[in-house]
Image (tube, rainbow, N blue to C red):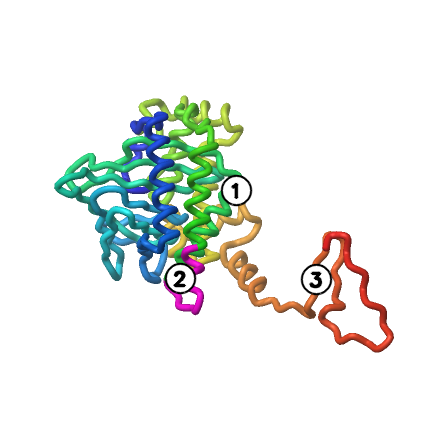
Amino acid sequence: MPQTGAPHALFAARSMSHHNRAEMRQAFDNAIKLVERNRLTLRVPHDVKPVQNRRGMHYHYRPEFFLGLNGWTDFSFPRENFRVGADEICVIPAGVPHEEAIGSTPDKPFRNLVAGFYNNTLSLHFAHEAQPGKPDIEVIEFFDAPNLDVFLTLANTLAQTHNTQGPARTAVLQGLLLALLGLFRNIVETGTGQLNSDIGKVFQAKCLVREQFANSELCVQHIAEVLGCSADYLSHLFHTETKERLTHYIQRIRIDGSILALESTKLTISEIAYASGFADPAYFARVFKQHKGMTPHEYRAQIEAHRNKQEDQPKTVYYDRLDFTHGLPAKKGSPTPAPSPSD
């Protein structure tokens, strides 16, 4: 969960009021204007080995987005530290370990606007200083986001572009920021926030699993204790509402995290197993095969083979055929191919 490691903060946080929504729209509008004038600072940590356990730090399998409103946040990473103040944005790539300490200015209390990404769900929340130097969720809204991949692509590309050099780097960063901020602004304006009505134990259990799946001690009993009910009651409720066993859901979320690590890191299979909440790599391999039909080694080999596969010939892909003529020299007297209806 962005800005805090305590699951109880999410469960206790209030949903956003009309006033909060208006404030959030204004924050995004202001950020968009600053980007258009090239007056908004973007901070991104440099490349670090992702998905590694560091004392005092945490990480997520999806990127995080922070917009500074008042006060400041000191971010610490394995190899660097930096401060993000008001009217500045920080994008933390997926899997990057970090911790935060926050502070207020003499005239204004600390306040950040934070975006979190879940499965087909986008969360936006205001963070405040709940304890000295410690951020927490003040109000939060969850939005159904079937186009979540667009948000993730923009955030990931922002991070990658920021840490590379190119002749059009500044223009690309500006365009990506405007697109991402615009999408945030639109979802605040048009989103219904219907997920806030789902404040029952099933939703809370899902949130807890997503946030703590890397904890090898996470189990149904532990979740039930946090939610204040019995394990049998929670298991029955979860299966009734979702048609999936909670134990299976925990495994599935852990496997989803391990897949991202297999695709995007060079970590060993054992390292990925431990980072995904499995105390035994051999057990991880068995569970992975149950879910994906192949071992983690086979899955990674398949991904590498796909990446290394070269196209035999240049081609144009149409909805009903492949056209190789654009990759071949034209022959004298040969007719020009008719354009496809889809052109």
**Label 1: few (<14), some (14–19) or many (≥20) C-alpha neighbours in 10 Å:** few
Q: Residue at x 52, y 42 (%)?
A: 147
Q: Which residue is mark 3?
A: 316
Q: Which mark is residue 170?
A: 2
Q: CA distance from mark 1 to mark 2?
A: 26 Å
**In the figure, 125 relative to 178: above or below?**
above
Q: Name the residue: 62% across, 69% down.
A: 310
Q: Position of residue 134 (x, y in %)?
A: 20, 40
Q: Identify which residue, 47 or 15, lies in the foreground.
A: 15
Mark 3 residue element: strand
Q: Earlier in the sequence, mark 1 or mark 2?
A: 1
Which residue is nearer to you in this view: 66 or 286?
66
Q: Amino acid at mark 1?
A: Asn
Q: Bounds of the magenta span? A: 163-174
Residue at position x 36%, y 23% in the image: 230
Disc 1 versus disc 3: distance between alpha carbons? 26 Å
